[in-house]
Amino acid sequence: MKVAASDYDGTLFRQQTIAEEDVQGVRDWRRAGHKFGVVSGRDYGMLIPQLHHYGVEYDYAVCNNGGIIRDQDGKVMYQGEIPPEALAGIIREPLVRHSFHFAFSAVDTTYICHEFDGSWIKREAQEWDFPLVAITEDQAGSLPEKVHQLSLGFPEPEQSVACAAVVNEHFGAHVHAFPNGCSLDITPAGVSKEQGLYKLLAVMGWEGAELYPIGDETNDLPMLEAFGGYTVDTAREAIKAHARQSFSSVGAMLEHFK
């Protein structure tokens, strides 16, 4: 059995859609007896409605950069946690405060505060009927659920990279910040797409399966480097340098290895 693991934004979801070639490629891959899932920085509730909309079949979802893993029925197989005191400290950092929003991901809830013009969280939530719970910044360190990712967003990718460096320097004992274009995803220390895939194989009983990850951004590099992964032709050269091979699409990779 083979396990394919695709990033979502920029890899499976490109030019504001998922191509029929990719939908059919996933279908053929699974009919051949293999497993397919998405490994994304997105919340589960913002990812799954889109997969259903485009007709993408899946066996699992590793969301929030490995912060939470669910099976095809939505059952939580693993969840990490950012210490509440770290959340409260991070949002006080000056560079962090330039973010369009602070979005805190729990199992079935995304809490949001510090939201300004330019934030795409509310737009996505309205488009895909994903509920957001408004909180005050004072509540960030005392939420009623475990938080496994804090998501930020900036006008320019360079701001995301600079903010990641500060967060990792000051809070690296508790979290790791992954820049992803203009987004910045902050997960518990030790959590990444690489760790998420190792954990996936363990909790699903798939140890020993051949793994085929594909992604296009900085937060994909841990899994690409750990598992000898692949990328798409539209990825930046800096990402291609870490990939074993580049394909025109996810569907093309699945067809190649099926």
Image: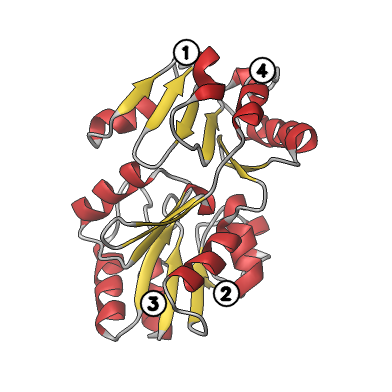
- Whole-number angstrom distance, CA of label 4 to CA of label 1: 13 Å
Check whether the beta carbons of the residues at disc 4 and disc 1 lie within 8 A of each other.
Answer: no
**Residue kind at label 2, given as amino acid type:** Gln
Q: In the rendered structure, which disc, 4 or 1, sits on the residue that comes first in sequence? A: 4
Q: Where is residue 256 drawn, in percent x and y?
A: 42, 83
Q: In the rendered structure, which disc, 2 or 3, sits on the residue that comes first in sequence? A: 2
Element type where label 4 sits in the image? loop
**Residue kind at label 4, given as amino acid type:** Arg
Check whether the beta carbons of the residues at disc 2 and disc 3 lie within 8 A of each other.
Answer: no
Q: Which mark is residue 136?
A: 1
Q: Which residue is mark 4?
A: 92
Q: Which mark is residue 254?
A: 3
Q: Is residue 86 left or right of residue 37?
A: right
Q: Where is residue 176 drawn, in percent x and y?
A: 67, 43
Element type where label 3 sits in the image? helix
Q: Is residue 133 left or right of residue 175?
A: left
Residue, far right: 169
Q: Dot 4, crowdedness within 10 Å: few (<14), some or many (≥20)? A: few
Q: Which residue is mark 2?
A: 245
Q: Which residue is nearer to you in this view: 137 or 229?
A: 137
